[in-house]
Amino acid sequence: MKKLIALSIAAAPSLAFAQAQIVDSTTLVQKFTSLGNTFIQVLIAFAVIWIIFNVIRFIVKADSDDRKTYQNAILWGIVGLFVILSLWGLVRILTNTFKTENVGPRPGEIPSIQYQP
């Protein structure tokens, strides 16, 4: 519990909305995009740390009966990392396919769809 509280306190400045003032929908979308990217990066880091931690435990417990447990933990860590990176890649493919960017309408403009052949 103490580690969770310490982690949330350490991550609070990067997740705070107080870093830039939200004045329109574009800045709000940019904030959510930034939060999403930070969340994905934390998930990737956690998955890599999980895999490395279980590989070390697997090596240290060379003659133990717990090796099967560590093998499963390593396998599920790799599967989780694959899923995270696949979803991130799929979003990037869709973004490039439909030529969407993090650019929104200027303040006072009416949102419109621009067709680019």
Image: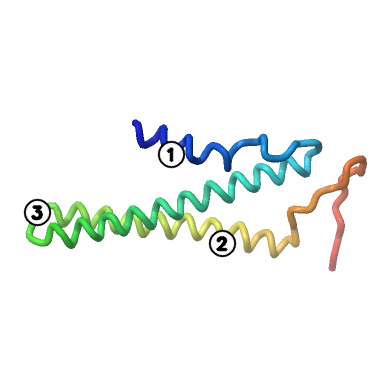
Q: Mark 3 is on which residue type? A: Asp
Residue designated by label 1: 7
Q: Mark 1 is on which residue type? A: Leu
Q: Mark 2 is on which residue type? A: Gly
- Of the residues under marks 3 and 2, which one precedes in the sequence? 3
Q: Residues within 10 Å of mark 2 (few under 14, many from 20)?
A: few
Q: Residues within 10 Å of mark 3 (few under 14, many from 20)?
A: few
Report the front residue among 8 and 96: 8
* Label 2: which secondary element: helix
* Label 3: which secondary element: loop
Q: Name the spot of residue 66 as percent of width and height, x first.
A: 13, 52
Q: Name the spot of residue 25 as percent of width and height, x first.
A: 78, 39
- Which of the 4 image quadrants contains residue 54? bottom left
What label does residue 89 carry, if any?
2
Report the front residue among 100 and 107: 107
Q: CA distance from mark 1 to mark 2?
A: 27 Å
Q: Name the spot of residue 46 as percent of width and height, x first.
A: 40, 51
Q: Name the spot of residue 97 as percent of width and height, x first.
A: 70, 64
Q: CA distance from mark 3 to mark 2?
A: 38 Å
What label does residue 65 carry, if any?
3
What label does residue 87 carry, if any?
none
Report the front residue among 11 and 57: 11
